[in-house]
Image: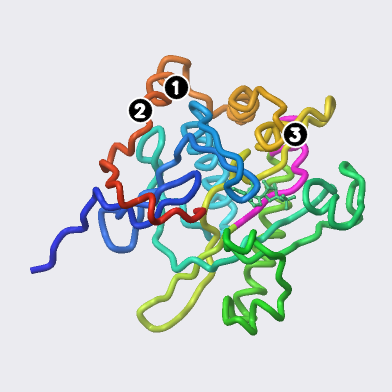
Amino acid sequence: MKRPPNRSQPIYEGKAKILLPGPDSSTLIQHFKDDATAFNNKKRAKIEGKGVLNNLISEYLFQSLSDIGLANHFLHRINMREQLVRRLEMIPLEVIVRNVSAGSFAERYGCAEGTILPRSIVEYCLKDDNLCDPPVGEDHITAFGLAHPNELDDMLSLSLRANDFLQGIFRAIGLRLVDFKLEFGRSIEENGDVSVWLADEISPDTCRLWDRDSQEKYDKDRFRRDLGGVEDAYREVARRLKVLPDNSSLAAASKASTPRSAKLAPKVAELNKEV
Ligand code: AIR
Ligand code: ASP
């Protein structure tokens, strides 16, 4: 007899999220934690309410991308910290899209932070904490067998489409989408057809968002650079996107940080990779 999936066993625990079995084998529950890490785990903190805010912001952005027909894993939000997503075979790459110079790009190429790039630049990094997510080119990706050239084409076009669309969404609420990171997974049909889908999350943890007028930062750089006001910044993004719940439900959800659909086994610490 086929045993039902053990809801209490996380499939994977990352630095900011946990993946749990979904109600059927084609789905997963993505749980957003309050943990924040930076510089490949060297800096860590808990930011109360961050998981709730990222869940709501990411829901809104993925739903909006679905509305324009951009294939992504989001199915629906389950509660304040969890969403149901399509189960994919993850491609171990971080795809970074940059519109304005900042962060590691500014440092690596000596291009002053804030310089508007003549066109959007897409970069790939190997998703591997032990190696500090090194940049890789298309040759590395195909030679290492990480993705097929057709999948690379799909990731590139999905990333550029997402960039155009997300820039518009953020522009409308007075924010500049400086750069962001995407992750993709593949879906393999019974007939062997393979397609590439956008996965993971899109939130102030994974984007740089600067206020159009004041240039104030509304993203994880507030944590990375000890600028303070991290939760307030995330909350402001949620407020401007009109996804901020009222204060009492936010406070209640912020406190309930244990996955509702599962009690975490101590084992999860062993699976400590970024999701
Ligand atoms: N990013 C990269 N790895 C993890 C994340 N979240 C995101 C950053 C930033 C962009 O990718 O949040 O928006 C580029 O980061 P960096 O550090 O390479 O400049
Ligand atoms: N590389 C990511 C960041 O700095 C995550 C991490 O290092 O933990 O945001």
Q: Which residue is drawn at 78% across and 47% down?
A: 103
* Label drawn at residue 250: 1
108 shown above or below 126: above
Residue under label 3, please give it.
175
Q: Quadrant of the N terminus?
A: bottom left
**Marks 3/1: CA–CA distance:** 23 Å
Q: Which of marks 1 and 2 is in front?
A: 2
Answer yes or no: do the residues labelled 1 and 2 have beta carbons within 8 Å?
Answer: no
Dominant SS of magenta comes to strand
Relative depth, front residue between 171 and 252: 252
Query: At label 3, which amino acid type do we have?
Result: Leu
Quote the CA–CA distance across marks 1 and 2.
Answer: 10 Å
Span highlighted in magenta in the image = 170-182
**Residue 176 inside the magenta-drawn segment:** yes
Task: Tell me residue 90's x, y (percent).
Answer: 49, 66
Is 205 a magenta residue? no
First in sequence: mark 1 vs mark 2 = 1
Q: Residue at x 45, y 40 (%)?
A: 32
Which residue is painted at 73% across and 73% down in the image? 137
Q: Which mark is residue 173?
A: none
Q: Residues within 10 Å of mark 3 (few under 14, many from 20)?
A: many
Q: Residues within 10 Å of mark 2 (few under 14, many from 20)?
A: few
Q: Nearer the viewer, residue 173 or 142?
A: 142
Residue 253 image offset from top left, x and y in percent: 39, 25
